[in-house]
Amino acid sequence: MNKTYDVLIIGAGINGCSIAYQTASRNRRTVVLEKNTVGAEASSAAAGMLGAQSEMEEYSPFFEFARRSRSMFPELVPELEEKSGTAVSYVRNGMIKVADTPEEQERLARMYAFQKRAGEEVEWLQPDMVKTIDRSIGGDYFGAIYLQGDGQVKAPELTKAYAGAAVREGAEFYEYTPALGFIFENGRVTGVETPQGRFYADQIVLAGGAWSRFMPPLGEELPPLIPVKGECVGLHSKRPIVEKTVHASDFYIVPKPGGSIIIGATEREGEMGKEVSAEAVQHLLHKACRLVPGLGRASWQYAWSGVRPQSADGKPYLGQTAFDGLWMAAGHYRNGILLSAVTGTWMADLLEGKAQEQEWIDAFSPQRLIHRKEEEIIGTDY
Ligand SMILES: Cc1cc2nc3c(=O)[nH]c(=O)nc-3n(C[C@H](O)[C@H](O)[C@H](O)COP(=O)(O)OP(=O)(O)OC[C@H]3O[C@@H](n4cnc5c(N)ncnc54)[C@H](O)[C@@H]3O)c2cc1C
């Protein structure tokens, strides 16, 4: 049986679910197709940091986009929790970014100066000051910055909350329903083929994370996406060990309400498998226990991995593709949980032709890279 909607979203990761929540709330008939289950991929692997300040050293549209998204959580979270019945454990516990190498110290000094200019809450901590913010931190380091405004959520729960709230607003979800290929009519993408039949919509949004380019017959004609696998380790402690999120140059420690502690994450470019290597577990535990020695007392829970969808220039692809009827919301790389809030409203605005900020339209357009050579794009910083 063929089905027809206003908006069809491919992928029930956090971004597909957030877009569905917004479009359904605006009374647009919305359907989400998911090849597995809601949040089955990167969105359930994430540590859940809402690090709007933690990666930015200079002004960019991306910085404003990230700040906007972070500012939406205090209002959005209670709304989603009430509509979905799912608690997402949102806390604003701040983040300490520790300089564990001289190079990282220089980078953090630049970040500190920029964040100050941008009017953000940020403190520079000399090595002897770090313990006054979180006394669990030991080991050797060259100072730190303290970002009071950054918070965190439980990412799998937030994904489910968006989905639950979207259903409450009238969206339909089809799990175990892979979109196998696009249907074209008169040069326009009008639907997708699935094992359960054809689904048609006025607007189709590709939100398939790192898998977004595997959609025949377009595939290679869509903007480039690089899979970057990340492995994590989960510990648990009944007694609090570390209070703040602690970030160092190549690992982080994220204490969750309830006693879980996430240590992440590796960056394996080009890898998509689910396995976790012994080397990754050893590296993460070694680094984390050296910086926060008390973690040695925590008990082992489990290890997991997920695949981050990285765009070619580090910014997400949000907007209309070069194909009529087809839109894209993918490439959120390390920030898809943070950006989920604004991705939902931004995509809903774009689909309705109501988006205002021209700077964001240009910066995130999936068509922005079409006329640039590959070597000019790779390595561009946001
Ligand atoms: C280890 C790790 C830690 C991270 N930590 C953080 C963090 O602390 N903070 C943060 O902001 N971000 C973090 N991220 C990044 C974040 O997880 C991602 O950016 C985000 O989850 C991407 O969401 P998405 O919805 O775009 O993609 P995904 O979550 O990958 O969802 C895409 C969905 O589309 C489905 N799909 C794909 N193709 C099809 C198809 N043809 N038909 C039907 N369904 C399809 C997939 O099954 C999947 O469910 C982390 C990522 C990893 C891996």
Image (tube, rainbow, N blue to C red):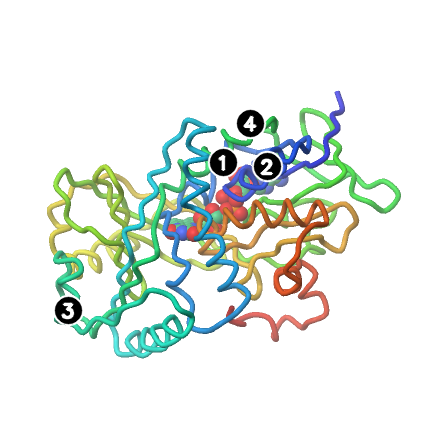
Instruction: Identify the secondary structure beneath mark 4.
Output: helix
- Give the residue at mark 1: 162
The amino acid pointed to by label 2 is Ala
The amino acid pointed to by label 1 is Tyr
Task: Quote the CA–CA distance across marks 1 and 4.
Answer: 9 Å
- In the rendered view, tell whether residue 363 sits above or below residue 190: below
Q: Position of residue 83 (x, y in %)?
A: 47, 28
Circle nearer the N terminus (3, 4) = 3
| Residue at (68, 50) in percent of width and height | 350
Q: Nearer the viewer, residue 318 or 361?
A: 361
Task: Quote the CA–CA distance across marks 3 and 4.
Answer: 48 Å
| Residue at (56, 36) in percent of width and height | 21
Asked if the residue at tag 4 contacts the one at tag 1, i.e. Cβ–Cβ closer than 8 Å, the answer is no
Count residues near mark 4 (Cα–Cα under 10 Å), then give few for <14, some for 14-19, many for 20+: many
Circle nearer the N terminus (3, 1) = 3
Asked if the residue at tag 2 contacts the one at tag 1, i.e. Cβ–Cβ closer than 8 Å, the answer is yes
- Give the residue at mark 3: 129
Instruction: Identify the secondary structure beneath mark 2.
Output: helix
Task: Quote the CA–CA distance across marks 2 and 3.
Answer: 45 Å
Q: Is residue 272 visible?
A: no
- Give the residue at mark 2: 20
Q: Position of residue 51 (x, y in %)?
A: 38, 57
- In the rendered view, tell whether residue 216 sits above or below residue 169: below
Instruction: Identify the secondary structure beneath mark 3.
Output: helix
